[in-house]
Amino acid sequence: MAQEIKSLAIATAPFAEKPRHAGKFRRLLARLSSLPSRAIDKIEWFGLTTQKIANTLRFEHFWREKIAKDHRVTIVPTFNKTTGKHPIWNVAINWINANSASGTILELGTNNGGSLKYFVDHLPQTFRLVGFDCFEGLPESWDGLPAGSIKGFGGPVELWADEPEKRREVVANLERGIMFPPPPQPNVEIESGLFSESVTRYLIRSGWPRDLRFIHFDADLYISTRPVLDTICGTLRYRYLILFDEFYSVNHEFKAWSEFVDLYKLSDWRVLSASEDGSQLLIEMNVHAPLG
Ligand SMILES: C[S@@+](CC[C@H](N)C(=O)[O-])C[C@H]1O[C@@H](n2cnc3c(N)ncnc32)[C@H](O)[C@@H]1O
């Protein structure tokens, strides 16, 4: 027999032109609501700058505690045009090769595919590599760059770097709005779209990685880093590596990392390598646990 659904009584209050703030301070602040939006933007800028100052001081503290006191940390040169980021990538690759013969590598922020190509070229084919990107540039403004910055060709074209003719064709097709084909490397997969959608899609399809060796965060933004750290890294209890590409961006990757380790109360990790300026940072997670 169908259950009878009764509508519930709703208590109402008099119509309000303005919100009835509960707190005294909020009521006081609300008096400033007639300020022009440019002035409100200035207030926000002041807030972000203050946060940057606090996070820069925290960054110095981090360096003192986690790097200066640990002489095992490999310091590599700051990014330059000659060596690129190869020195710290090589530290990661050597660790992976020394510790395992297969596993999963994830890259958040693949863009033209330059870093992913380097990793796939230097690891055996038994490793599966997955690159995530929306290929539309940064979804939000970042450290002075507007949203949409760092947009490359619109696909991971460097994966075809060994076949210049094919690479040119992929680039030309992207310019005409034609999607790039599957990567030429059978062990590389590309997940297109915003991480909020593509990471979720990947996890539903493949499950949580049981053999993650290395996760490369190269999406610059706090909002692109913290949710993935929480979702993927928050659950892993085995040994693996995390590489941040813009760790010195104190309101973004550094903030995401600091909040993440606090939230999950993680202490069994160490810095394996850092660039001299702190922009790239390689972390070994769950140091005392076995590999997955
Ligand atoms: C610095 S680039 C990556 C460079 C690449 N790893 C390399 O070394 O060649 C950053 C990339 O992150 C992507 N990105 C940032 N936030 C994202 C998000 N929430 N979802 C998808 N892609 C994102 C941007 O589209 C951009 O291509």
Image (cartoon, grey):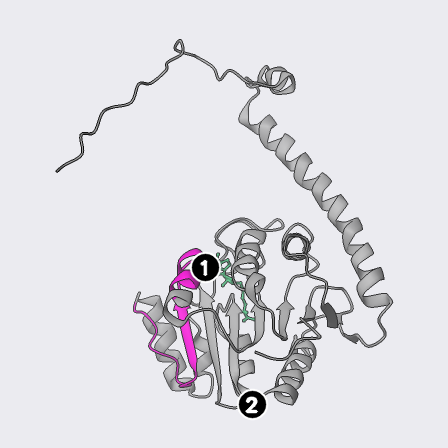
- Which residue: 59% across, 32% down? 41
**Which amino acid is tagged 2?**
Ala
Q: State the quadrant of the N terminus.
A: top left
> Which of the pair 183/235 is nearer the observer?
235
The image quarter containing residue 181 is bottom left
Find the magenta span and give its range.
Answer: 178-201
Instruction: Categorize mark 2 by other alpha carbons within 10 Å: few (<14), some (14-19), many (20+).
Output: few
Please tell me whether mark 1 or mark 2 is closer to you in this view: 2
The response on whether ligand 1 sits within 8 Å of label 1 is yes
Of the pair 144 and 2, the residue shown nearer to us: 2
Percent coordinates x, y for residue 256 in the rendering: 63, 54
Which comes before the other along the chain, label 1 or label 2? 2
Residue 58 seen from this side: yes
* Residue 135 in view of the camera: no
Residue 189 versus residue 94 in the image, above or below: above
Task: Verify whether residue 191 appears in magenta.
Answer: yes
Residue 226, position as x, y percentages in the image: 57, 55
Q: Is residue 242 left or right of residue 113?
A: right
Identify the amino acid type marked 1: Phe
Where does residue 143 sit, x and y in percent of width and height?
Answer: 63, 50
Is residue 269 shown above or below 45? below
Residue 281 in the image: above or below residue 211: above
Q: Which residue is mark 2?
A: 101
Residue at image mark 1: 195
Residue 182 colored in magenta in the image: yes
Classify mark 2: helix, strand or loop: loop
239 relative position to 64: left or right: left
For the C terminus, the quadrant is bottom right
| Element assignment for label 1 | helix
Label 1, label 2: how far apart the Cα atoms are: 28 Å
Q: Position of residue 247 (x, y in %)?
A: 68, 61
Q: Is residue 136 above or below residue 30?
A: below
